[in-house]
Image (cartoon, grey):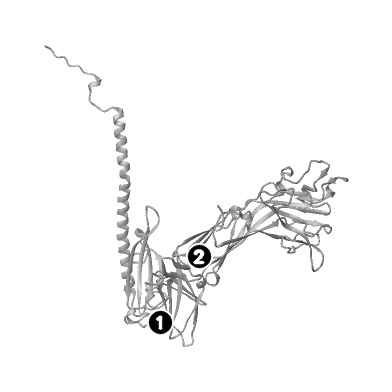
Amino acid sequence: MKLRMLTSADTENGFTLVEILVALVILLLVVTSCLPLFTMAARVTYENKARMTATQIAKQELERTLAQTNANNYNNENDTDPGGAPLKTGVTGPYAPTLPDGTPDPTLSNYQIRKIVSWIDDPDDGQHPSDTLPFDYKQLIIEVTCPSIFTGAVTKHADFKTFVAKEGSSSPITGIVVEVVRGWTDDNGKRIPVEGATVTLEGNTSSKTAVTNEAGQAMFPMTFPNDNTVYSYQVECECSGMILRPDMQAVAVEARPYTTSFVQIEMEYPATLSLSFAPSLKDTAVTLDGHTTMGSTTKVLKAGDTVLTFSDLWPAGTDPDNPAKVCSGGTYSLSIGSMSIHRTDISTADAGSYLYHQISTEEQKNLWKLHADYNGSPAWVADDANYPSGTTFFTSGAHRLAFPAAIDLSSFRPAISTVQATLSLAFSSSESPFSISGYNSLPDGFSLLYLGDEDADLSTDDGWNSLIQIQTDTTSNSRILADANSNPLAVDINGELANPQEIDIDSEYFNNPFFIRFDSDPSIDRFYFRDIEILCRYSFNGSIQFSGPNDTLQLKISGE
């Protein structure tokens, strides 16, 4: 029997195109997932190499400084002094590493050296003020930094610290000790020293700089040409991220022979106060007053803004969880200017949309009429001269004008119990905002301006409260405009309310919408007004303190 073998493409071994594509995708995913590992490995390798290089640079700089130091130049503070000043107090640098001949090393151009020298008051022989000679020895710190090739941020790679004794050198007799401490105390109420702060003494003829040591002290030795010498300085202090207590911005100190002067400076990480409001229609001044210690700051809440932030504040206060932890300075008080919270702009009004009173007899007219240009500006005017001769008007007391939209001030209610608010109504235009003339024939108590609740009826006085009315002054026997409590309102010779004339409104209008109504009478020669504005003044009755450094305090003054 013969066997016959058949072959075809279906039975051949190999990979299809789909299988190859799937394999490539899997390989791509594996390689992609490994990329972070390669990056991390490269970063670790670079960091280790940079750290080793920086350590070597710091060690060499430390040895070079110590080799240059001797008993004769230990106290030198001027580079031109004999022997130089290898241990000059303060910060030297940053500067680049150099070759043995003093020229920059091109292979280390990315590295920067900073040398910090400060005096130390040895506690073994007592400390200032009991130790009248606190300048016991110097501390030398060498810092080496370089930028990261990954982020570009400067990183400190080495920090060498050593103490250098002054063996064989003459001891400084006197000087100035500036102690820098945190504003906030520790859990036991004790001061916390600030290490690494830069302290500068600015004098009439010279300045001196030193960096605070572990005890928070910047020590400045002094030499005096004679016993009558007195040096006067202003103390300035800086430390990254921290601020000076505001009343310590310019502390004065004097250096005198045979005594060591001492001054303590407070620094702390600043606090932030954020205030939130319902938006005002106009810019409003807000003042945060820290009184004598912390000073006063005024900022402007811009029209339409809802948040105002005070930053870089001295964080005076008490830790609520530990009364021993405190920061002195007192408390802040808050003063908020007059906010414009509503404006009825009659220049954009549609006369037909206003609910001024009418009756069915068309021959009788209401005195009120909206003029688009009345002496240069829009105004509502009640004056029979604006109508044709022979026009018949409503009977007395019926000339009423009310605005159709209720005014809702609920979003401006004080948000917390320590905030109080007062309302007032004002006529905002600077040109004749509210004017009335020829009203002597009207009886006392005739009201010109009302506020009404949501259910007030325009045809009666029910639900309406008088704001401005006509009265007779008991002293001069002349007719005046007065508020609802019969207090005279300032009126000039033309019968215009002084601008800005504010009329107090009951705070109950925060809670319920209300309407505005104006009344006139044919016996009044002329009565007109322009835009109407409602103002609110907030007062903060509490005191503001913080609970710790870097604290952010948020206060809601008003708003939903």
Q: Amino acid at mark 1?
A: Pro
Mark 2 nearby-residue class (10 Å; few <14, some 14–19, many ≥20): many
* Residue 432 at least partly seen: no
Q: Amino acid at mark 2?
A: Leu
* Left or right of 369, for residue 214: left
Report the residue marked by disc 2: 313
- Is 49 positioned to the left or the right of 510 in the image? left
What SS does tag 2 mark?
strand
In the displayed orientation, state which residue is furthest to the bottom.
Answer: 227
Q: Which mark is residue 129?
A: 1
* 359 on left or right of 200: right
Residue that lies at the very extreme toward the top in this rendered image: 1
Q: Position of residue 169 (x, y in %)?
A: 34, 82
| Callout 1: SS | loop
Percent position (x, y) of residue 538? 60, 61
Say which residue appears at 83% left-offset and 59% top-offset: 440
Q: State the image coordinates of residue 286 (x, y, percent, origin top left).
A: 59, 62
Within 10 Å of disc 1 (Cα), the crowding (few <14, some 14-19, many 20+) is: few
Q: Is residue 298 above or below residue 43?
A: below
Quarter placement of the N terminus: top left
Number of numbered markers: 2
Q: Is residue 440 above or below residue 384?
A: below
